[in-house]
Image: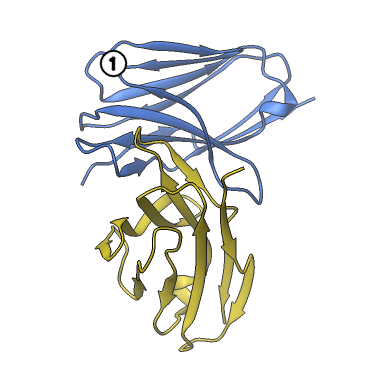
Amino acid sequence: TQLLEQSPQFLSIQEGENLTVYCNSSSVFSSLQWYRQEPGEGPVLLVTVVTGGEVKKLKRLTFQFGDARKDSSLHITAAQPGDTGLYLCAGAGGSARQLTFGSGTQLTVLP
Amino acid sequence: DAEITQSPRHKITETGRQVTLACHQTWNHNNMFWYRQDLGHGLRLIHYSYGVQDTNKGEVSDGYSVSRSNTEDLPLTLESAASSQTSVYFCASSDPYGTQYFGPGTRLLVL
């Protein structure tokens, strides 16, 4: 069974601060996805990283896939209250049809 | 626009009763999934289907069943509801690239 450990579980910061969320595993994934979930809704895909060492930027969000494709990070620059939500990483195995989800990071950005 | 819907959005039932949660997608995706989300556990896979008449057990399948008679629908049945099945349930379908699209969730309370 592939496991994904996500840290921290909870993060509360002030508007304008930077933060990093980590997603680690002992397993190799063919790709890794990051989702964001708001209260009362289902998760929505933010990005997919496929190549080891890949870095993708989405405005103030930077996603990195580890060289060995076992870990990933999400860095947010100058966080805003609108970034508040549950961030989930999810790894795809060989078939890429199933995903293993991390336990999530609940981010609260205070104005 | 294509979408994925779940019904009901909220359900209260009693221990021992049979409950069916509906999931309907208009993406025309072959792959569909059912997850439960509990605090501290992220999303855990219950059952999944890769096409009509195909169903497979996920990580936490005990006490649940699914059927796939057409592309659009994957109903989830709790055969005899237990208090441990109180949770938020999410249905998802995925495109050929592995991106999963989630429904809005069903909040189930078993008394």
Where residue A3 appears, x then y in whole percent?
Answer: 28, 41
The answer to whether residue B41 of the structure is visible from this angle is: no
Q: Which residue is identified by label 1?
A: A51
Colour scheme of the picture: by chain
Image height of A16 relative to B70, above or below: above
The answer to whether residue B107 of the structure is visible from this angle is: yes
Q: Who's the residue at 71% across and 14% down the image?
A: A16
Q: Who's the residue at 67% across and 32% down the image?
A: A84
- Circle 1: element type: loop
The amino acid pointed to by label 1 is: Thr
Give the blue chain's letter.
Answer: A
- From the image, which quarter does the C terminus of chain B lie in? bottom right
Q: How many numbered discs sit on the rendered protein?
A: 1
Q: Horizontally, is A90 left or right of B5 in the view?
A: left
Where residue A101 appears, x then y in whole percent?
Answer: 38, 42
Image hue for chain B: yellow
Image height of B36 relative to B81, above or below: above
Q: Who's the residue at 22% across and 18% down the image?
A: A68
Where residue A35 appears, x then y in whole percent?
Answer: 50, 34
Image quadrant in which you'd find residue B11:
bottom right
Image height of B93 relative to B106, above or below: above
